[in-house]
Image (cartoon, rainbow, N blue to C red):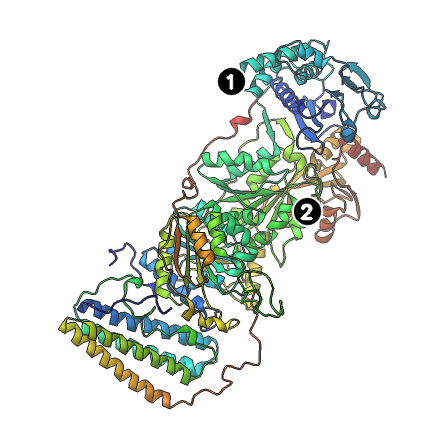
């Protein structure tokens, strides 16, 4: 939905930036956790394991941001009041890319996309901000994400790209109703 | 920024520990997330909400929430929800299901639920397919979509749920896309808050039987104009759009169904005197 | 003067649409009640909605009556338009009187063939002599005179029916009625014993069903109109509001059953009423109520089936559908009232059973007891009331479908914090999670069966009257006919016959039935359907005496006490 959800990344306050950063990680934790469970339900343990790891990484990152926030009182925003550049927080997995037979390589590609989006989000905030303190903090967050991007790239390299028939399933789906 | 709410739970607190049967990648996961976010934002207590459904993939949604739920029989979610809301007007009643459940086997109930205008919110997760029975055409499937049950396509024009809802008297009519989780959450919060019968069609891709619907995220777009309070204008708009306009289409102000007075256990009325001769 | 209903007085008032025979019949019944008599009225109709021929079949008696007599003492025709189409409803003989207006066509040959005495009454002319007078009031006065009803009672009945705001109309009607009344010399009917006038109710079975529902605690009804059940819903609609409840009109019976289930899930005792075709549509919903364990009462006012059948006539032919219609192993309860006034008792009991067992209960009424209006003794209050075992003070270990000794699991009502669960038509675990395991399926099946089978139904499962080595087993509206037939038998026959009228058709009560049949060596099963549905149910589930006879025939004609008495007599002599 190219035209929808485009919101200005200008003029974040420090508290707003912190709450955006926090929610990116918290939603990512939720999203990876649910995907890990789904993959486990479908018997794709390899990808479930990767998503579990991602859940832990994002949880650690959330804790780090919470430390950064310290005593700052974070605003209480409704989900639709956040100013994401797309429809969702940048580190939420795009469900359109999820498949029960997906390979670790593909899963990590999706995760990489997320880290890149997060990096882009913070860079945009930094670039658009007129407040030095906010700008500085956004750069810091962008740098963290850049670090994650590097990790993800190393990680992906350990897994071969999928075969052409990666989604071939000789059995039909189950009828349940 | 929202005011301090009476029941402040996180969206995740509204989810149950039951694991969905849905395929990974299914749009219904997003609808579940949106619904949880909307009721969290409205600060509704989980025990004051009842989510009522019929049969189908999307109709499994009540069990995945930590609210009261009723997973009924195929096509009858709206009457279940209607009876519940009329008898218990204090509850927030949300009805949910799919396009087969709501537009085919339950089609008659949709007309009358819109007309009756009981204060419930009806969410249809529309993937243009019967998913749980392995991919048969539904009332919203395109006529040329090839399937085992209708080789070469049904040759039958799809049903236009939003127009039907408008014509039948729904008081709030909207279309959303599951991938727009936060936009959908906002829309659902509005629908739940709007008095009378609110109808929200959510385009929710079936990645298993309609992998082509993975493209929906690139096809949906916001409406060119904001909602209207004129039902005929709304109908004209939605009949001429491409089916991928998302947003609130119509907000009406028709009086909601007259609510019963609260159930009075202390009633000791005497109706037998009328029989005396 | 005898208190045997056999000594009653039966009148059939016939006329084309607009002639007002039903109104006259209603007034006759009211006036009789005022005189301390008991009575019963049936409306018989032809195939037209308006304008077709119509008849009020009225029976008056010094003792309570539950069925029509074998014959009519009087057949009064305001006119004889299409009377042949209804002639089967009028059993008249050489001792009957046929009253006819000389201004109308002659009495049809099919009626005169009975040999009945013909009397002339210038109904039209007499009515025309009074401003605003109508022929039906002249007819009313005449038959009231024949029935020995007082002028005062007649005036009272007319005023009551027409209402306080229509004095002119009342005056005209009374004047016309008195013209008819004065044409009779003396009563030709049994009178109420002196001082017999006590408090009486005038009530139809459908109203009685509504009253039983209200007394039982029903506060939500879903309604889809269908003959002959609609009056239950129409009676309930305003009264439920008065009682703090509500009635919602549904778009079809699929909706009405599900609305009732939804409301009951919300904690409000709920009911819907229908007839055969509607019951068929509700069956899937009933299965849901079984599986999700939601109390709900469905009243089926049976009519002639299958399909649209004969909507205005009775038949006891939905028993199989009510007992066996649900798919899967689906324990539920089926009860049947055995008289018009028993509709109060049985419906109230049904609400109590549904609420106590968290299961659906089908009440099998029928067109005869549903639409018959009786004058009867007031129906006493009984102590059944809706009482559901609710889950309160819920802790972490709470399970909605907990396996309990009696099979009944405490139910949380929406709004109860911590009790959230999803009621489900999918098989589930005790924690209300969907489950495909054979373990959960078996334990839940056992639990649902146990709560129905082990429930204490007390003495209400059947009405048992008399003693003897012969037993008549029947149910529903046929009971009243059998009761009267047994009254008519000579005491040396009747003292050998026991009557067992089943109120509880499902679950079966094998122990209680064995006790009731102890010492019985021959049994006759009487019911109004083509295949002997109760007979076959008994054969399947009960130990029966070696000799079992069956008397069953379909509607639309109801059994008459004389034919049953004859049959029992023959049977006793075999």
Whether residue C412 is visible here, answered yes or no, is no
Chain bearing tag 2 is: C
Earlier in the chain: of badge 1 and badge 2, it is 1
Q: Position of residue A139 (x, y in %)?
A: 20, 78
Q: Nearer the viewer, mark 1 or mark 2?
A: 1
Crowding around mark 1 (Cα neighbors within 10 Å: few <14, some 14 to 19, many 20+) is few
Which quadrant would the N terminus of chain A be assigned to in this image?
bottom left
**What residue is at 33 percent from the left and 59 percent from the top?**
B40
Horizontally, residue B195 falls left or right of residue B140, namely: left
Q: Which mark is residue C165?
A: 1
Residue at disc 1, secondary structure: loop
Q: Nearer the viewer, residue C130 or C565?
A: C130
Q: Position of residue C386 (x, y in %)?
A: 50, 43
Q: Position of residue C325 (x, y in %)?
A: 65, 53
For the residues bearing labels 1 and 2, Cβ distance under 8 angstroms: no
Horizontally, residue A47 falls left or right of residue C132, namely: left
In the rendered image of this protein, does residue C91 appear above or below residue A96?
above
The residue indicated by pointer 2 is C319
Q: Are marks 1 and 2 on the same chain?
A: yes
Chain bearing tag 1 is: C
Q: Quadrant of residue C288?
A: bottom right
Horizontally, residue C112 falls left or right of residue C543, namely: right
Q: Position of residue A173 (x, y in %)?
A: 55, 74
């Amino acid at each position: 939905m190219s035209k929808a959800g485009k919101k200005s990344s200008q003029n974040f306050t420090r508290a707003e930036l912190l709450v955006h950063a926090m929610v990116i990680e918290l939603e990512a934790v939720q999203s990876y956790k649910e995907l890990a469970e789904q993959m486990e339900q479908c018997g794709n343990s390899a990808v479930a394991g990767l998503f579990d790891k991602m859940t832990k990484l994002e949880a650690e990152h959330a804790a780090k941001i919470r430390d950064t926030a310290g005593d700052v009182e974070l605003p209480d925003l409704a989900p639709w009041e956040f100013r994401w550049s797309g429809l969702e927080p940048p580190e939420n997995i795009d469900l359109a890319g999820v498949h029960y037979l997906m390979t670790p390589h593909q899963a990590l590609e999706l995760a990489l996309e997320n880290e890149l989006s997060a990096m882009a989000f913070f860079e945009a905030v930094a670039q658009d901000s007129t407040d030095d303190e906010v700008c500085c903090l956004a750069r810091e967050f962008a740098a963290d994400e850049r670090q994650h991007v590097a990790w993800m790239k190393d990680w992906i390299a350990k897994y071969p790209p999928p075969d052409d028939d990666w989604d071939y399933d000789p059995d039909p789906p189950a009828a349940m109703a | 920024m929202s005011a301090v709410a009476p029941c402040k739970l996180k969206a995740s607190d509204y989810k149950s520990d039951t694991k969905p049967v849905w395929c990974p990648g299914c749009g219904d996961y997003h609808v579940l997330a949106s619904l949880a976010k909307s009721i969290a934002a409205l600060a509704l207590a989980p025990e004051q909400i009842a989510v009522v459904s019929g049969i189908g993939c999307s109709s499994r949604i009540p069990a995945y929430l930590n609210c009261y739920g009723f997973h009924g029989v195929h096509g009858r979610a709206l009457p279940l929800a209607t009876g519940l809301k009329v008898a218990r007007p204090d509850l927030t009643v949300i009805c949910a299901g799919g396009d087969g459940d709501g537009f085919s086997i339950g089609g008659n109930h949709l007309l009358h639920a819109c007309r009756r205008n009981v204060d419930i919110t009806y969410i249809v997760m529309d993937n243009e397919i019967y998913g749980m029975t392995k991919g048969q055409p539904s009332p919203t499937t395109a006529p040329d979509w090839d399937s085992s049950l209708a080789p070469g396509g049904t040759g039958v024009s799809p049903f236009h749920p939003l127009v039907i809802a408008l014509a039948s008297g729904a008081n709030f009519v909207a279309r959303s896309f599951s991938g727009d989780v936060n936009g959908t959450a906002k829309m659902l919060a509005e629908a739940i808050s709007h008095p009378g019968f609110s109808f929200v069609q959510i385009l929710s891709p079936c990645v298993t039987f309609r992998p082509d619907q993975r493209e929906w995220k690139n096809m949906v777009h916001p409406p060119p104009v904001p909602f209207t309070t004129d039902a005929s204008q709304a109908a004209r708009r939605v009949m001429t759009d491409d089916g991928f306009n998302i947003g609130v289409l119509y907000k009406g102000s028709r009086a909601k169904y007259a609510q019963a007075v609260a159930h009075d256990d202390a009633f000791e009325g005497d109706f037998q005197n009328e029989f005396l001769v | 003067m005898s208190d045997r209903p056999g000594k009653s007085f039966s009148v059939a008032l016939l006329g084309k649409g607009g002639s007002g025979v039903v109104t006259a019949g209603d007034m006759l019944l009211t006036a009789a009640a005022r005189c301390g008599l008991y009575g019963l009225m049936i409306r018989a109709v032809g195939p037209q909605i308006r304008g077709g021929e119509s008849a009020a079949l009225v029976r008056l008696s010094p003792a309570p009556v539950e069925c029509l007599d074998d014959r009519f003492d009087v057949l009064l025709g305001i006119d004889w338009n299409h009377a042949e189409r209804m002639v089967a409803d009028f059993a008249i003989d050489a001792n009957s009187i046929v009253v006819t207006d000389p201004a109308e066509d002659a009495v049809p040959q099919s009626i005169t063939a009975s040999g009945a005495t013909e009397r002339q009454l210038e109904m039209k002319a007499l009515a025309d002599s009074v401003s605003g007078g109508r022929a039906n009031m002249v007819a009313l006065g005449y038959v009231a005179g024949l029935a020995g009803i007082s002028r005062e009672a007649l005036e009272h009945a007319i005023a009551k029916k027409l209402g306080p705001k229509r004095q002119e109309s009342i005056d005209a009607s009374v004047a016309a009625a008195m013209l008819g009344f004065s044409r009779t010399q003396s009563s030709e009917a049994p009178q109420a014993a002196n001082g017999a006038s006590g408090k009486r109710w005038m009530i139809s079975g459908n109203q009685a069903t509504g009253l039983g529902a209200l007394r039982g605690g029903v506060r939500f009804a879903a309604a889809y109109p269908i003959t002959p059940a609609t009056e239950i819903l129409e009676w309930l609609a305003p009264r439920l509001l008065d009682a703090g409840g509500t009635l919602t009109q549904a778009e079809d019976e699929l909706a009405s059953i599900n609305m009732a289930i939804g409301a009951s899930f919300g904690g409000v005792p709920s009911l819907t009423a229908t007839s055969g075709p509607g019951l068929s549509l509700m069956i899937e919903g009933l299965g849901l109520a079984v599986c999700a364990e939601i109390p709900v009462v469905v009243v089926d006012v049976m009519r002639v089936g299958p399909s649209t059948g004969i909507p205005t006539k009775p038949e006891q032919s939905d028993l199989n559908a009510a007992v066996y219609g649900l798919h899967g192993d689906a324990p539920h309860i089926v009860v049947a009232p055995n008289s018009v006034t028993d509709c109060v008792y049985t419906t109230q009991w049904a609400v109590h059973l549904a609420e106590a067992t968290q299961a659906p209960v089908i009440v099998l009424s029928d067109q005869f007891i549903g639409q018959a209006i009786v004058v009867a003794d007031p129906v006493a209050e009984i102590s059944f009331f809706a009482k559901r075992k609710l889950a309160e003070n819920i802790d972490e270990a709470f399970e909605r479908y907990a396996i309990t000794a009696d099979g009944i699991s405490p139910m949380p009502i929406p709004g109860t914090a911590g009790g959230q669960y999803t009621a489900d038509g999918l098989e589930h675990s005790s924690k209300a999670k969907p489950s495909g395991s054979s373990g959960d399926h078996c334990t839940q099946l056992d639990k649902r069966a146990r709560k129905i089978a082990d429930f204490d139904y007390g003495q209400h499962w059947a009405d048992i009257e008399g003693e003897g080595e012969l037993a008549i087993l029947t149910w529903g509206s046929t009971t009243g006919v059998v009761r009267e037939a047994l009254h008519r038998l000579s005491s040396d026959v009747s003292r050998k016959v026991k009557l067992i009228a089943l109120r509880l058709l499902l679950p079966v009560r094998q122990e209680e039935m064995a006790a009731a049949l102890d010492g019985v060596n021959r049994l006759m099963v009487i019911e109004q359907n083509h295949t002997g549905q109760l007979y076959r149910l008994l054969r399947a589930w009960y130990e029966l005496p070696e000799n079992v006879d069956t008397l069953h025939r379909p509607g639309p004609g109801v059994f008459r006490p004389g034919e049953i008495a004859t049959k029992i007599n023959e049977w006793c002599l075999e």
